[in-house]
Image: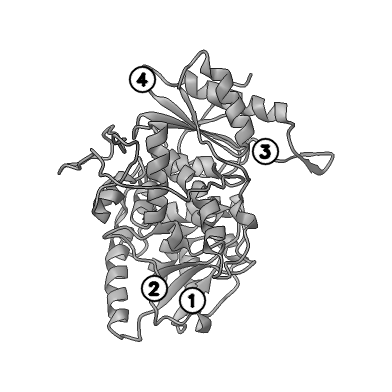
Amino acid sequence: MLSSSVFKKLAWATVAITSFLALVHQQGFSISTTIPLFSKTKTNETSFVGSNFAREEQFLPLGARDVDVLPKWIQEYIVFHEKEKKRSKEGDASVKFLVMSCVSKACHGGTVDRLTPVPFFVLLAALSGRVLLIHWTIPSELENFLVPPTGGIDWTKPPHVDLGAATNPSTRNWMNEATPRTLEDILNKYNKSQVLNLSFGAGSTQFMKMEQLLADHTKQELKYGEESQEDWTAIFPTLFSKVFTPSPRLAEFMVKEITNLGLVRGNFLAVHGRVHYPFRKDGKPQYPTVEEESQILRNAIDCAINIREKESDANIYVACDRIHVAESIKDEYESEFPGLVKVDEGVNEDQHIAFSTFNDGAHEDVVVEPFLPTFSDLWIMGMARCVVHGVGGYGSFSAMLAGNRCTYSHRRGEKRFWTAEHTQCPNK
């Protein structure tokens, strides 16, 4: 089910989507409002609202706000991007591109490792006056999972752009540079290259440096000279909502998941349990025992139960990298809290995008279907009222998408995306 270590391989060979949702979007829709995401029909089958825009609104991260919350340099870049891409489509060869790529073995790390640099690449594209493209082919094209939203940044590669002719500089030492101005100077070295292709690897230190550079640039407004919103708990999810929305295939998968589990937008709690995570003992990586994994997840769920506040009807959505552990723990809680803990079913194999292989174009379902739960869990947790997460960046990334309104850490680990207060859960 989920995260950066994990996840599910489901056989959805006979899914039938035959009816429309009862949910109708009204004008004045506010994503901070608690509303049902989806409704079951009489046949227990689901469908989502017909138009792309209506579907996208249903999947907005809970922390996303109006575009006004974005700093001026991002707002202006969104306009610039659309204009420049249109000029390129009309045949203007002077348009330049910055490609965030994941097409070779140099692109490593899990789902969040690959998505985290996106805001930083928006900054690089703005500094260098380039159109940002995202080209991801491992394990499959990113468009199989995430697509540009209506009216957002269209990062898809135009057919006429030749990535084979791209300049591919090393970015190994870029994160050691002191300021965004230095990054701008570095980018100017490649000013003559029409297509600049960059790929960033994993690493929490790198992520934190990117966040700092983004915050510094937002504060200083190097290009525009005005102060802007510095609250990244609002900027982060809003920017992502302008870059990504679930693809139709992922949206269909999420509809079934959310409907079957009876989740309500903004009124459920999410628990991320990456319990099968190595620790070092005598200099060697070792994994927890099954009992230790179970205790880690119990502590996480207990934490969620303790913070349910007055909303006794709020369900707890558990995304865990060991489904047998999650299902066993769910059974333990069922007698005392009937129906409270929601765990996906049907998982029979772990999936981790970091260890995925190249897409040879001949077996699309092999490289798409197993990873739908990875993206689904990430996005569903980003619509939770409160997120309880553990080690790694997957859960804390979802907490950022949810706006960091209510964020708890149930297991100590590296700090990533901790721009807001994260309360430590009590250990048992």
Tags 3 and 4 touching, CB below 8 Å:
no
- The amino acid sitting under disc 3 is His
Return the residue at label 4: 311
Return the residue at label 2: 130
Left or right: 111 as drawn, with respect to 401 = right
Real-space Cα separation, disc 3 to disc 2, in angstroms: 41 Å
Task: Check disc 4 and report its element: helix, strand or loop.
Answer: loop
Tags 1 and 2 touching, CB below 8 Å:
yes
- Which mark sits nearer the N-terminus, 3 or 1? 1
Task: Check disc 3 and report its element: helix, strand or loop.
Answer: loop
- The amino acid sitting under disc 4 is Glu
Left or right: 266 as drawn, with respect to 2 = left
Q: Which mark is residue 167?
A: none
Tags 3 and 1 touching, CB below 8 Å:
no
- Which mark sits nearer the N-terminus, 1 or 2? 2
Which of labels 3 and 2 is toward the front?
A: 3
Q: Residue at x 49, y 79 (%)?
A: 163
Real-space Cα separation, disc 3 to disc 4, in angstroms: 31 Å
Q: Residue at x 60, y 66 (%)?
A: 358
- Which mark sits nearer the N-terminus, 1 or 4? 1
Q: Residue at x 26, y 34 (%)?
A: 33
- x and y percentages locating residue 126 in the rendered image: 38, 67
Return the residue at label 1: 196
Residue closest to the eye, 69 or 43? 43
Q: Which mark is residue 276?
A: 3
Tags 3 and 2 touching, CB below 8 Å:
no
- Which mark sits nearer the N-terminus, 4 or 2? 2
| Identity of the residue furthest to the right in this view | 282
Which of labels 4 and 2 is toward the front?
A: 4
- Which mark sits nearer the N-terminus, 3 or 2? 2
